[in-house]
Image: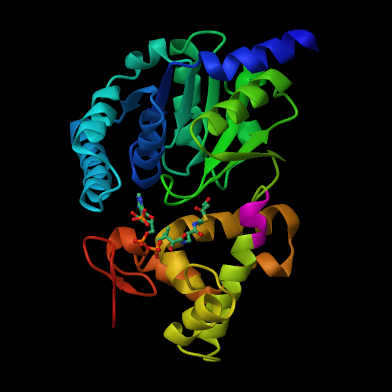
Amino acid sequence: GTEAAADTAEGAAAVRTVGVVGLGTMGAGIAEVFARAGLDVVGVEADAAALDAGRRRLDASLARAVQRGRLSDEDRDGIVGRIALYTERAALAAADLVVEVVPERIEAKREVFAELDRIVPEGAVLATNTSSLAVTEIAACTTRPERVVGMHFFNPAPVMELVEVVTTVRTEPAAAALASGLAARVGKTPVTVGDRAGFVANALLLPFLNHAVVLLEERVASRDDIDAAVRDGIGLPMGPLALLDLIGLDVSLAVLDVLWAEFRDPRYAAAPLLRRMVAAGLLGRKTGRGFHRHADDGAQEPE
Ligand code: 3HC
């Protein structure tokens, strides 16, 4: 109704402080996105070592932008100054919206949300960046499921424009509109999607990436030729095996497994090679090796 509309128009514009729980690859990127747009960011990690690692990720990404001449030293300092980092979740008490970006385990997410529900002001929106878990299930451990949404960013978060705003059967329109409005305010393109496995982008992307692993497994073509075929023939920015390394083979497998569990569609049956590589700890860029080998700076190295 009109009340919801008012909440919408004012909601996103009124947001001043955004919380980010978890400063891994995605969390650090998401914190950067909000701080670049002028918002105050409260970043939280579990302990001092994880917080240091998060700070290093943020610093490295900003240093790279400065080095490439896309960011002035002054603007970098402004961004850094807007990001406050803590190991105590109590620091989130001032947040208007919090995005949870902890590892993809339902117990971990539910523990975070139950605590956020106690700490974060009553009207604030709680968002999860999950790519493979049901937002509905995460929302159910709070007393405010109507204020819970998914805000699904894409890797690398500072570059990719899309944010899938995921609504559940309990989400109120004003909360979804606030999340979409905020995404737009920080320069992203929001799309609204329902809470089903894979949402939209991953439901389409993952079977394609998985199929590339099947082609490799069946020795139809070499790794580099599969990547070249897609990059140079279809015009995507990266080949599918390189993209799996960027996303993380573990994350990719988790998404495929929930798609399979929900729909039992053979398109979603993970390639055995993908599962074995995850078991072997070859997770892609974050471990230095997946289908490709990667240098510390993320650059792809020839075999
Ligand atoms: N952080 C910040 N900026 C980055 C970055 C990072 N991690 N990686 C790249 N960039 C910036 C660069 O600085 C550069 O900016 P500039 O042109 O203004 O200098 C720009 O992005 C292009 O980077 P590069 O020149 O280094 O390299 P590329 O042109 O090859 O682009 C890429 C790199 C942006 C990663 C591009 O290859 C790409 O778009 N790949 C596809 C990524 C994709 O599909 N992501 C979605 C995965 S699915 C997902 O995340 C969902 C999850 O749930 C599974």
Q: Quadrant of the C terminus?
A: bottom left
In the picture shown, does residue 120 fall above or below 155? above
Does the stretch in magenta take in 201? Answer: yes
Of residues 148 and 174, which is closer to you in this image? 174
Provide the residue span drawn in magenta: 200-204
Rendering coords of residue 176 (x, y %): 66, 26
Of residues 254 and 131, which is closer to you in this image? 131
Does the stretch in magenta take in 155? Answer: no
- Residue 125 in which image quadrant: top right
In the picture shown, does residue 171 fall above or below 158? above
Q: In which quarter of the image is the N terminus?
A: top right
Q: Residue at x 71, y 52 (%)?
A: 262
In the picture shown, does residue 101 fall above or below 118? below
Residue 150 in sight: yes
Q: Residue at x 57, y 55 (%)?
A: 255
Of residues 87 and 115, which is closer to you in this image? 87
